[in-house]
Amino acid sequence: MSKQVNSVAPWCALALLAACASFTPQHASKMRDAAAYNTQLGIDYMSQGDLQRAKDKLDKALAQNPDSADVHGARAALFQRLGDAGKADAEFRTALRLAPHDPRIVNNYAVYLCQNGRTDEGVKRFLEVAHNALYPTPEAAYTNAGVCLRAAKHDDVARANFMQALQLHPNYAEAAFQLANLQFEHGELGPARAGIDSFLGSFGATPDLLLLGVRVARAQGDRLAAQRYARRLQLDFPGTDQAHALAALDNNPG
């Protein structure tokens, strides 16, 4: 019996050494690289609408590097696309546990929260991103917070967030559009028109602002100004959704 035991022990030792050898730093690095590659493939497939292939790649990435916040963040986006809110939320929370101060993940979670009617949590997360020194575009975070608040009919607070975004970056077109659109919908035609004209004169045109300019000028009864906005939209941004919306507006002026 003792010979049998002694003959087995070296094989156990060799097996343990082999297992240890398979988890060298080089191997771990290769696994992380493979997970990053498959994560990017999964994101690419998601953008193409091929959710099954996206899931296959992200499942593989998870097996390769289960401690990657990027993997869990991408899987959260996938489950959101698949309509599985429970799994999406769980993946976001895992990603945040692994990288609690990563502004990209916090921002994406905030978008998810707002899209699911969790306004207070979403706005809190957006403001967390806005105050994160590592996030390069705090004006976008403030604007996203405003959009989230508008969806919940908190227009006064939304207005303050749009204005904060413009104080940080006066040339941020999305904030200018959102603020002018809010003013327009509240019947504040003068301020909306002034904001549009100021932005166009200082920073250039966007199709959203030009289309909104048409609507504001028509509401003011200023036909010439409406024509100027419309012509610029047609010339500078032909074929855009806004140009098509202008055509529909012309066909249904009421």
Image (cartoon, grey):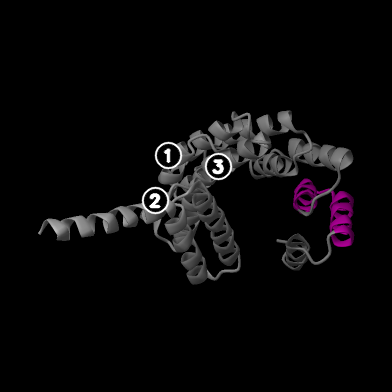
Q: Residues within 10 Å of mark 1 (few under 14, many from 20)?
A: few
Mark 1 lies on residue: 97
Q: Which mark is residue 20?
A: 2
Disc 1 element: helix
Q: Earlier in the sequence, mark 2 or mark 3?
A: 2
In the foreground, 98 or 204: 98
Closest to the camera, between mark 2 and mark 3, is 2
In the foreground, 34 or 102: 34
Q: Main secondary structure of the magenta part?
A: helix
Q: Which mark is residue 44?
A: none
* Amino acid bearing label 3: Asn
Image-based side of 191 in relation to 94, left or right: right
Q: Which residues are magenta?
A: 208-236
Q: CA distance from mark 1 to mark 3?
A: 14 Å
* Amino acid bearing label 2: Cys
Is 216 magenta? The answer is yes
Residue 22, by quadrant, is bottom left
Is 215 magenta? The answer is yes
The relative height of residue 191 versus residue 45 in the rendered view (above or below) is: above
Q: Earlier in the sequence, mark 2 or mark 1?
A: 2
Image-based side of 112 in relation to 246, left or right: left
Mark 3 lies on residue: 107
> In this view, which residue lies farthest toward the front?
3
Q: For the point 84% across and 57% down, which residue is it?
A: 233
- Image quadrant for the N terminus? bottom left
Q: Residues within 10 Å of mark 2 (few under 14, many from 20)?
A: few
What x and y, as percent, mark residue 248?
Answer: 73, 66
What x and y, as percent, mark residue 106?
Answer: 52, 40
